[in-house]
Image (tube, rainbow, N blue to C red):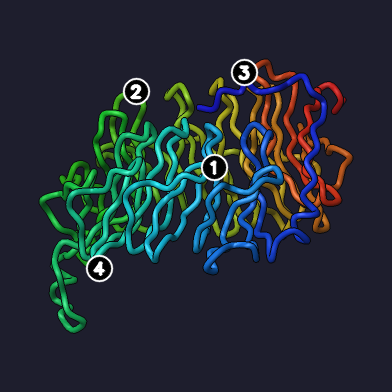
């Protein structure tokens, strides 16, 4: 996890001009701010590059030492490193703080980052074969096709759905027999399936995935072995951090239930049930559910909130102390926030993922109104309209908030006491 203790929580405000970048360079793409707020960066194109190699990254007004032919997907890791997918001499790889990996590929895409930021993975294509690369180490075995890549939370394992049996356009029987399996760290399961979707990797290195056994039968497979029971549909599995058992939503007789290792566990079925989430201590289990058409809410340990929303519920988030839960909601075309079964009074054009203070006492989020962005804390708005903003962050003691915004061509890093919100 990100160590916010070492961040600067004393300096009230730091400012970095970014508006002049548009006049300095041929073009400037979307900016990104580092988690600690100390850096702001964007992909730029400079007319000064030799041999038409004009791609670069500008960080706090300074460009990387070496330009590249092409650059895209600029992102900061949680530990503050700046990454991008870059092309040199027609080959693609990952660059970290301007330094490319040694391995090069015909193409790379979909970079993934571990929670602590120490590990970086990506999908690659080389010689019309596909695989994954983790911290500059590619899979030894590659496949004819690869989809739905995953990185374990600890950053030690990669996995993906891969095609293991070739089939022509008219060989429908092969598709029905199964041509897809899952591979972890390049090693494929022994059994193929009709389809393999969303995967989860446990801290012990076990791999679970949604699988389709026939055109009509779905279940969960763990390390290549399907559950004994099949269902009319399944959603993404997760591992219990305490027992190591696999939990997944399953469809039975038109209703959605929660199952543990193939056995139904919650007594109440729902019209829809998905996006399951364990609390940090592993003792509570929540999910986004629907009790009927246009009736979305959150269920915790099988019990649904009384509050319903007509359009949407997303970004389910537990507090670090595991005692509270919040979600972004949409009701009657307006976005909002719900915490512990109660909705904020303020509504918005858009709301981003809730951020809890370490003790769970406060909830903050980036919000949008009228094309401008600001931060909301406990249903109270920070009185500044910004051209851009990023998710807020709390200090380790929960008394201060870090705001990262762009206002009138200036990137601003501010530390705001929670007490200023009243």
User: Can you say which quadrant of the picture contains the C terminus?
Assistant: top right
Residue 25, position as x, y percentages in the image: 70, 61
Q: Are marks 1 and 3 in contact (CB under 8 Å)?
A: no
Image position of 198 with respect to 11: above or below: below
Q: Residue at x 70, y 39 (%)?
A: 365
Tag 4 or tag 1, which sits nearer the N-term? 1
Point out the frontmost of discs 2 and 4: 4
Residue 421, position as x, y percentages in the image: 85, 28
Q: Would residue 109 be found to the left or right of residue 34 on screen?
A: left
- Residue 133 or 268: which is nearer the viewer? 133
Residue 264, visible in the rendered structure: yes
Residue 266, position as x, y percentages in the image: 39, 37
**In 3D space, how far apart are the residues under numbered discs 2 and 4 (Cα atoms)?**
41 Å
Point out the frontmost of discs 1 and 3: 1
Image position of 414 with respect to 256: above or below: above
- Name the quadrant containing residue 307: top right
Instruction: Identify residue for label 4.
Output: 128
Point out the frontmost of discs 4 and 3: 4
Point out the frontmost of discs 1 and 2: 1
Tag 3 or tag 2, which sits nearer the N-term? 3
Q: Is disc 4 placed on a helix, strand or loop?
A: loop
Numbered circle sitting on residue 242: 2
Instruction: Identify residue for label 3.
Output: 5
- Residue 83 or 365: which is nearer the viewer? 83
**In 3D space, how far apart are the residues under numbered discs 1 and 4 (Cα atoms)?**
29 Å
Numbered circle sitting on residue 82: 1
Tag 2 or tag 1, which sits nearer the N-term? 1
Q: Would residue 111 be found to the left or right of residue 142 on screen?
A: right
Tag 4 or tag 2, which sits nearer the N-term? 4
Q: Residue at x 80, y 58 (%)?
A: 371
Tag 3 or tag 4, which sits nearer the N-term? 3
- Residue 217 or 384: which is nearer the viewer? 384
């Amino acid at each position: 996890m990100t160590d916010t203790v070492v961040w600067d929580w004393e300096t009230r405000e730091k400012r970095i001009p970014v508006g002049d970048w548009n006049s300095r360079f041929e073009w400037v793409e979307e900016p990104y701010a580092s988690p600690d707020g100390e850096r702001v960066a964007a992909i730029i194109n400079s007319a000064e590059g030799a041999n038409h190699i004009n791609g670069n990254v500008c960080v706090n007004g300074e460009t990387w030492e070496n330009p590249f032919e092409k650059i895209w997907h600029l992102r900061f890791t949680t530990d503050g490193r700046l990454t991008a997918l870059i092309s040199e001499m027609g080959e693609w790889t990952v660059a970290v703080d301007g330094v490319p990996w040694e391995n090069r590929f015909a193409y790379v895409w979909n970079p993934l980052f571990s929670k602590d930021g120490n590990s970086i993975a990506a999908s690659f294509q080389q010689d019309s074969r596909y695989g994954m690369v983790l911290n500059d180490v590619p899979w030894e075995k590659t496949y004819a096709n690869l989809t739905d890549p995953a990185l374990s939370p600890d950053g030690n394992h990669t996995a993906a759905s891969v095609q293991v049996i070739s089939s022509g356009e008219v060989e429908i029987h092969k598709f029905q027999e199964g041509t897809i399996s899952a591979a972890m760290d390049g090693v494929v399961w022994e059994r193929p399936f009709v389809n393999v979707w969303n995967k989860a990797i446990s801290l012990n290195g076990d791999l679970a995935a949604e699988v389709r056994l026939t055109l009509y039968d779905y279940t969960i497979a763990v390390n290549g072995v399907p559950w004994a029971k099949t269902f009319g549909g399944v959603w993404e599995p997760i591992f219990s951090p305490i027992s190591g058992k696999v939990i997944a939503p399953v469809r039975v007789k038109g209703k959605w239930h929660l199952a543990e290792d193939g056995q139904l566990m919650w007594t109440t079925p729902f019209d829809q049930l998905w996006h399951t989430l364990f609390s940090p201590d592993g003792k509570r289990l929540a999910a986004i559910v629907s009790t009927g058409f246009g009736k979305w809410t959150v269920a915790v340990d099988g019990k649904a909130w009384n509050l319903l929303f007509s359009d949407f519920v997303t970004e389910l988030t537990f507090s670090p102390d595991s005692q509270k839960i919040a979600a972004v909601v949409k009701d009657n075309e307006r976005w909002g926030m719900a915490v512990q079964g109660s909705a904020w009074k303020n509504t918005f054009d858009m709301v981003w993922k809730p951020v809890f203070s370490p003790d769970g006492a406060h909830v903050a989020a980036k919000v949008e109104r009228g094309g401008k962005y600001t931060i909301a804390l406990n249903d109270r708005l920070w009185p500044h309209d910004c051209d851009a903003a990023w998710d807020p962050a709390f200090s380790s003691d929960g008394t201060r908030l870090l705001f990262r915004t762009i206002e009138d061509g200036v990137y601003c890093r501010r530390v705001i006491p929670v007490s200023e919100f009243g």
